[in-house]
Image (cartoon, grey):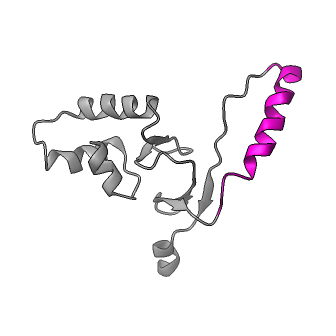
Amino acid sequence: MLEELQKVTSHPTAADLYEIIRKRLPKISLGTVYRNLELLVENQTIQKLDMNGAEARFDGNPARHCHVRCSVCGRVGDLHSVAPDPLKQKIKKIKKIKKSDGWEILGYRIEFEGTCPDCQKES
């Protein structure tokens, strides 16, 4: 499963990945795919992308990087031109502020939205 996920850059849903894996393992169940994806996420081997208003997608690259979602077709891609590292210092400051607000900050997620190259060509 991990091998198949790491081969693609399309950030597939669990159902998409199930269809890919079934070609190699025809008897695998969708439930097995979901369970194993969650285990891989828990072990920080892969990333689960909970994009706003869309089905969760998965990324075989566990390194911290930014993603962008097309507001027209829903495609999700890696955003290589934006580095998440400059945000680290700001997040450290936010974690210090948490005590006065009562929140325990566990992490952060930034969702970029745009129009993918294919949708730009169509308009």
Report the front residue among 16 and 72: 16
The residue stretch that appears in magenta: 82-102
Expressed as whole percent of the image width and height from the top left, the position of residue 60 reads 40, 48
Q: Is residue 14 above or below residue 116?
A: above
Q: Quadrant of residue 27?
A: top left
The part of the image, by quadrant, that contains residue 38 is top left
Locate residue 111 relative to residue 25 in the image: left or right.
right
Query: Is 22 or 85 nearer to us in this picture?
Result: 85
Q: Is residue 89 left or right of residue 33?
A: right
Q: Is residue 18 left or right of residue 105?
A: left
Residue occupying the point 37% across, 28% down: 39
Tell me if residue 70 is in the magenta stretch. no
Total number of numbered discs in the rendering: 0
Q: Is residue 58 above or below residue 34?
A: below
For the point 28% across and 48% down, the residue is 3
- Residue 64 percent location from the top left of the image: 57, 48
> Position of 95 compared to 76: left or right?
right
Can you give x and y, in whole percent of width and height, for residue 73 in the image?
46, 62
* Residue farthest toward the right in the current orientation of the protein: 100
Identify the residue at image location x=14%, y=50%. 23
Residue at image position (31%, 43%) is 2
* Vertical order, 13 against 38 (above or below): below
State the quadrant of the N terminus. Answer: top left
Q: Residue furthest left?
A: 27
Q: Position of residue 79 (x, y in %)?
A: 57, 62
Query: What predominant SS class does the magenta segment belong to?
Result: helix
Instruction: Examine the rendered structure and indicate whether residue 116 appears above or below residue 69.
Output: below
